[in-house]
């Protein structure tokens, strides 16, 4: 069972997303800010990180950069509500495996996670 870390400051969204991932057969973990995300990455060593771009204490690009530097094997999916080609290109250059835009369609996420 693949471990997946969901990082988003919207608690209800994160909890609902975690429930869906469980149904899809994944083992989800949750973090609601950047600091707890970095701690969870070190402790749980997830196969995949699904991370919101905008968080209260740090942006997702910092989490992406630190994750890829220490654990390049971890797949990283950046999630954002704001479509911006410059941001998407930057995330990919930093090592994001995918960039997903909200609103999230669960069937599309399931297919994406199966590829990773």
Image (cartoon, rainbow, N blue to C red):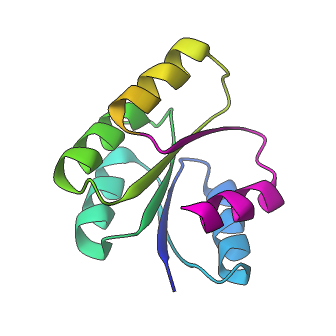
Q: Residue at x 69, y 55 (%)?
A: 13
Examine the structure image and report whether residue 114 is included in the region drawn in magenta. yes
Q: Is residue 112 above or below residue 27?
A: above
Q: Where is residue 66 in the image (x, y as percent from the top left)?
A: 23, 43
The front one of 27 and 94 is 94
Task: Write down the region rendered in magenta.
Answer: 96-116
Is 34 situated left or right of 84 in this image? left
Q: In this view, does 78 lie above or below 74?
A: above
The front one of 49 and 29 is 49
Q: Is residue 59 visible?
A: no
Give the mark count: 0
> Looking at the image, which residue sits at the far front?
115
Q: Is residue 33 visible?
A: yes
Give the position of the C terminus as an image quadrant: bottom right
Residue 59 location, quadrant? top left
Q: Where is residue 17 in the image (x, y as percent from the top left)?
A: 68, 64
Q: Where is residue 33 in the image (x, y as percent from the top left)?
A: 41, 48
Q: Which residue is drawn at 38% across and 27% down?
A: 93
The front one of 13 and 48 is 48
Residue 100 location, quadrant? top right
Examine the structure image and report whether residue 43 is included in the region drawn in magenta. no
């Amino acid at each position: 069972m693949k471990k997946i870390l969901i990082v988003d400051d919207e608690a209800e969204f994160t909890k609902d997303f975690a429930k869906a991932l469980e149904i899809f057969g994944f083992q989800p973990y949750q973090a609601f800010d950047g600091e707890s995300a970095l701690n969870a990455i070190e402790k749980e060593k997830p196969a995949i990180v699904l991370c919101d771009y905008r968080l209260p204490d740090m942006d997702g690009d910092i989490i992406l950069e630190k994750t890829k530097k220490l654990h390049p094997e971890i797949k990283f999916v950046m999630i954002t509500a704001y479509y911006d080609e410059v941001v998407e290109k930057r995330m990919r250059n930093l090592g994001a495996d995918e960039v997903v835009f909200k609103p999230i369609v669960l069937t599309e996420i399931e297919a994406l996670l199966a590829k990773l």
